[in-house]
Each structure stands twice: as C-alpha cells, then as structure tokens.
Image (tube, grey):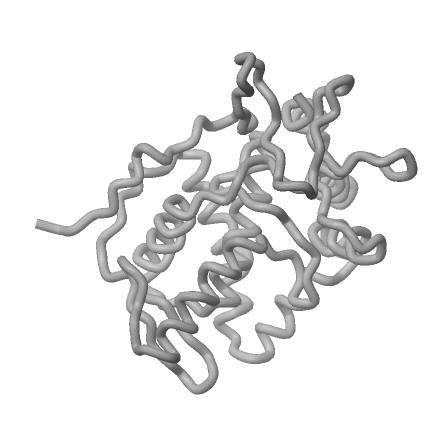
C-alpha cells in the first residue's frame, strides 16, 4: 500500500482570491504583517502612502503544506531530485501562472525582488532551513530525502503524492512551470545562467515586473506581473486584475 500525503484540508478554492474574515464578519484581503495595510475605501491590500501607489505583493499567506505537496508531486511525477534554486523558482512560476489565469496562487507568499530574482521569502527560508539541518546534523525533513552534490543540495520525495490534492487548473499551472524552467536547468551551469536571464530580463514578463520592483526597492506587484504578461503576449487579463483587487 503506497504512502501518501494528505493535504486535502489545505486545498484552495480555485478561481477565487484568498480572503480572511475580520471580527465583524467582513471579508478582507489577506494582509502581511506591517508590510501591507488595508485601504477601507478602495477595498485593496497594499503598501499605502500618500506618495506611492498600492503594491499588491501577497494574495494569500504562504501555505507550508501545499508547498511541500506541490514540490513533492512535481519531483515524483518527473522522477527528478530538485535543488533549492529549482524549488523556489518552480514555486514562483506555478503561482504566477495560476494567478494570471485565475487570480489565485497555489501556495501563496510575498513575492520579493532578491538578487537571485523573484523569490517567495517564506519558501526560500523553509528550504534553506532544511538544508542547514542536513548540513549540520544530517537530518532530512518529513517526506523528503536530502542529498549533497558538491555545494548543492537536492531534495527527493520519500512518499507518493496524490494529484487529487490539487485542482486541474493548479496541476496545469504546475506543469507549465516545470516545462518552462526545467529544460533550462537540465543544461547544467549554462542552463542556470539562461534561467537567471529569464528572471532578470526586461524582455520577459517576470523580469520586467522584477526590475521595476527592484529599481523602486519594494516588493513585486501582482498587477505589474499581469500587465507585463499581457503587454508581451498581447493578451488581456483585466478581469483577473479585478478579481485580485476585490
């Protein structure tokens, strides 16, 4: 009998933005600590000042269980161990693709413009902690085995994930992320450099949004990701921007 991860209690509702309920029972967009504030007049979450527009950098909090399940599913499906860099970039891409089409991330988190490129802070921290525990004590996290290849650390799932933990649209976004990133990563160091160019270049939608945020020293705005995607691909996702602004 195969082992499985049970994450059904963490499954998201597809095609709807993540919301929380305040004490009065009012639906409010998710806010992140003190980095974002809720604007009661416009009904949007963002960094609100008199000088700068609102920045919508987080649509829902980072979900550790869904993160683990998504990474385990992709690694298991494609029979490939994943490095820390590959994991955090797959997370960014799968959430980006699902937000662009449906207005809701698969995993969530705050999208930040690191030197590494776009990164969800919490995802990097989680995998980094796993690798530190392995380096200093030889321990691997639950449901994964860590192996060392030179200075790199690779994670392999130790269980058989269930695709039923995700909706059809989420699985499609996850696969789209894999098909974009992993052909580059399979080329070795040159592929890594190619991926860096993709995440940093103004010729790509994600690079364009990243560079704008980096220049202004702030988090990456989901609206700007959608705008850049539409500008480059000649599409119109205005309806999605309305959804995430509700």
Residue 173 drawn at (x, y percent): 49, 43
Residue 81 drawn at (x, y percent): 36, 68
Q: Which residue appears farthest toward the right when viewing the image?
A: 51
* Image: 233 above or below 139: above
The picture quadrant where one finds residue 226 is top right
Of 154 and 126, nearer the camera is 126
Of 106 and 203, nearer the camera is 106
112 left or right, relative to 185: right
Q: Residue at x 42, y 48 (%)?
A: 64
Of 23 and 183, nearer the camera is 23
Name the quarter where the C terminus is drawn: top right
Q: Residue at x 45, y 49 (%)?
A: 175
Q: Residue at x 70, y 28 (%)?
A: 38
* Image: 155 above or below 218: below
Of 107 and 1, nearer the camera is 107
The picture quadrant where one finds residue 119 is bottom right
């Amino acid at each position: 009998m195969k082992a499985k991860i049970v994450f059904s209690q963490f499954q998201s509702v597809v095609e709807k933005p993540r919301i929380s309920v305040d004490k009065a029972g009012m639906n409010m967009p998710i806010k992140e600590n003190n980095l974002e504030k809720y604007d009661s007049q416009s009904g949007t979450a963002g960094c609100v000042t008199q000088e700068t527009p609102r920045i919508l950098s987080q649509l829902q909090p980072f979900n550790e269980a869904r993160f683990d399940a998504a990474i385990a599913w992709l690694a298991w499906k494609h029979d490939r161990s994943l490095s820390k860099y590959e994991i955090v970039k797959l997370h960014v891409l799968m959430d980006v693709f699902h937000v662009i089409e449906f207005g809701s991330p698969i995993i969530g988190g705050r999208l930040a413009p690191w030197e590494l490129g776009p990164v969800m802070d919490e995802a990097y921290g989680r995998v980094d902690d796993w690798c530190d525990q392995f380096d200093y004590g030889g321990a691997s996290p639950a449901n994964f085995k860590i192996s060392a290849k030179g200075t790199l650390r690779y994670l392999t799932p130790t269980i058989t994930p269930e695709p039923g933990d995700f909706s059809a649209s989420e699985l499609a976004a996850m696969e789209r992320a894999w098909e974009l990133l992993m052909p580059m990563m399979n080329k070795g160091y040159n592929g890594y450099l190619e991926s860096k160019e993709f995440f940093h270049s103004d010729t790509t939608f994600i690079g364009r949004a990243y560079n704008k945020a980096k220049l202004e020293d702030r988090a990456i705005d989901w609206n700007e990701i959608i705008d850049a995607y539409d500008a480059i691909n000649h599409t119109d996702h205005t309806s999605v921007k309305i959804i995430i602004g509700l």
